[in-house]
């Protein structure tokens, strides 16, 4: 039984990595505008997905079709994970419920992806599809951490309420940022403000017709369609929220290095979170300055998922082991 549990731990971690790869491929599909390269679903040009000839996977088809095949494989692996969790009697019920939640989420994700193609990629459906992918990743991280040796050996006697509160707040802010980023991408607002660190030539946006005219003049010169003020606002919100996340992260650093020097795993999580956010901000600037070069944009989206995952791991490491302890520590003053 111990060997089965060890194998399950490794399996859950591999599934997390494959899901991150799937998010990368999904980002590449959007960055290359390949979402309708395969216009039918669940078939691929009338053929069973895995029977489609490899020599015909050219251009955008290779991105979209590879994304679909990996998504199907991950769906099957998630079913195996769920059944495996349900089979092991020594696991607590809440972990088994997480497995069921993972399978329901990945199934909904696959259906949403198919519907997005069938209805020609409506913005709201494409955004929901992207956000649900990030949610699925969080569920898998939760399962992998719940099964890990680290969690089962940690005492959590010295949990810090302030660190937990700020970590949760930061996690929520990052999740909201990914929702905003998804909406910005699918609303074609990625270059609604085409300069950085300035915005339409100024450090402080005016949101008037003159600002919109300057932006659209630049877009006309670069053979791009005009944008509306709404697109400009959603792009600005993405930048502004990123600044708030950066400031919140600085404050979290101050608290952790003052109060949690005896928690090496929290310090480790914070280190990697700092690194990921710094690189993410750099990639965000590079995305704008490169006029949304496909691979730069894809890395920016993928690293956003990594930032979310690391921030969630920090919450898990800062939290106590049981829900009752969590509620108690969270109400401490």
Image (cartoon, helix red, strand yellow):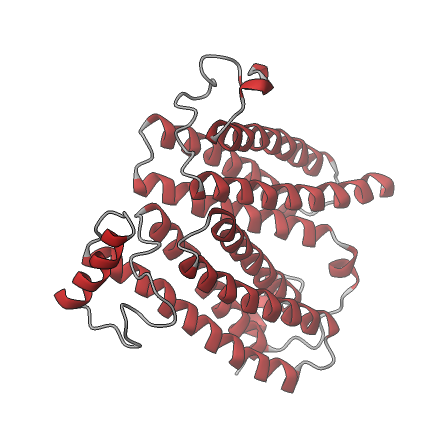
Q: Residue drawn at (32%, 30%), measured in percent from left and top?
A: 120
Q: Residue drawn at (54%, 70%), measured in percent from left and top?
A: 167
On-image quarter of the N terminus: top right
Numbered marks: total = 0
**Residue 179, percent across and down?**
40, 54
Res. 317 in view:
yes
Kindly give the residue lying farthest to the front in the view shown: 221
Q: Residue drawn at (65%, 83%), measured in percent from left and top?
A: 257
**Residue 323, percent across and down?**
59, 61
Q: Quadrant of residue 6?
A: top right
Q: Residue drawn at (75%, 46%), measured in percent from left and top?
A: 9
**Residue 85, percent across and down?**
69, 38
Res. 90 in view:
no
Q: Nearer the viewer, residue 328 or 96?
A: 96
Whether residue 137 is situated above or below residue 46 in the rendered picture: below
Kindly give the residue lying farthest to the left in the view shown: 209
Q: Nearer the viewer, residue 281 or 309?
A: 281
Kindly give the residue lying farthest to the bottom in the view shown: 258
- Left or right, 186 with respect to 60, comes to left
Q: Quadrant of residue 97?
A: top right
**Residue 318, percent across and down?**
63, 69
Whether residue 92 is situated above or below residue 313 in the rendered picture: above
- Left or right, 143 with respect to 297, comes to right
- Left or right, 236 with respect to 315, comes to left
């Amino acid at each position: 039984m111990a060997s089965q549990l060890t194998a399950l731990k490794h399996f859950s971690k591999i599934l997390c990595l494959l899901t991150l790869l799937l998010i990368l491929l999904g980002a590449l599909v959007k960055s290359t505008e390949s979402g309708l390269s395969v216009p039918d679903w669940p078939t691929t040009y009338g053929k069973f997905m895995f029977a489609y000839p490899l020599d015909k996977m050219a251009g955008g088809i290779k991105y979209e079709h590879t994304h679909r095949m990996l998504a199907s494989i991950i769906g099957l692996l998630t079913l195996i994970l769920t059944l495996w969790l349900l089979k092991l009697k020594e696991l607590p019920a809440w972990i088994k419920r997480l497995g069921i939640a993972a399978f329901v989420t990945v199934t909904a994700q696959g259906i949403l992806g198919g519907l997005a193609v069938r209805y020609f990629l409506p913005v709201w459906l494409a955004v929901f599809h992207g956000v649900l992918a990030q949610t699925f990743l969080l569920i898998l991280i939760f399962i992998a951490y719940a099964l890990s040796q680290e969690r089962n050996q940690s005492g959590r006697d010295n949990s810090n309420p302030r660190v937990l509160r700020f970590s949760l707040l930061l996690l929520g802010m990052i999740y909201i940022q990914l929702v905003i980023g998804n909406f910005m991408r699918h609303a074609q607002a990625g270059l609604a403000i085409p300069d950085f660190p300035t915005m339409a030539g100024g450090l402080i946006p005016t949101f008037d017709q003159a600002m919109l005219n300057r932006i659209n003049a630049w877009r006309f010169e670069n053979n791009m369609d005009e944008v509306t003020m709404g697109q400009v606002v959603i792009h600005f919100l993405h930048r502004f929220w990123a600044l708030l996340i950066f400031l919140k992260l600085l404050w979290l650093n101050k608290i952790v290095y003052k109060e949690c020097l005896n928690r090496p795993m929290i310090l480790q999580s914070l280190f990697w979170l700092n690194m990921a956010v710094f690189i993410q901000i750099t990639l965000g600037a590079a995305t704008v300055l490169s006029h949304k070069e496909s691979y730069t944009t894809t890395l920016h989206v993928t690293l956003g998922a990594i930032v979310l995952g690391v921030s969630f791991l920090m919450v898990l490491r800062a939290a106590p082991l049981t829900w009752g302890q969590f509620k108690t520590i969270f109400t401490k003053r």
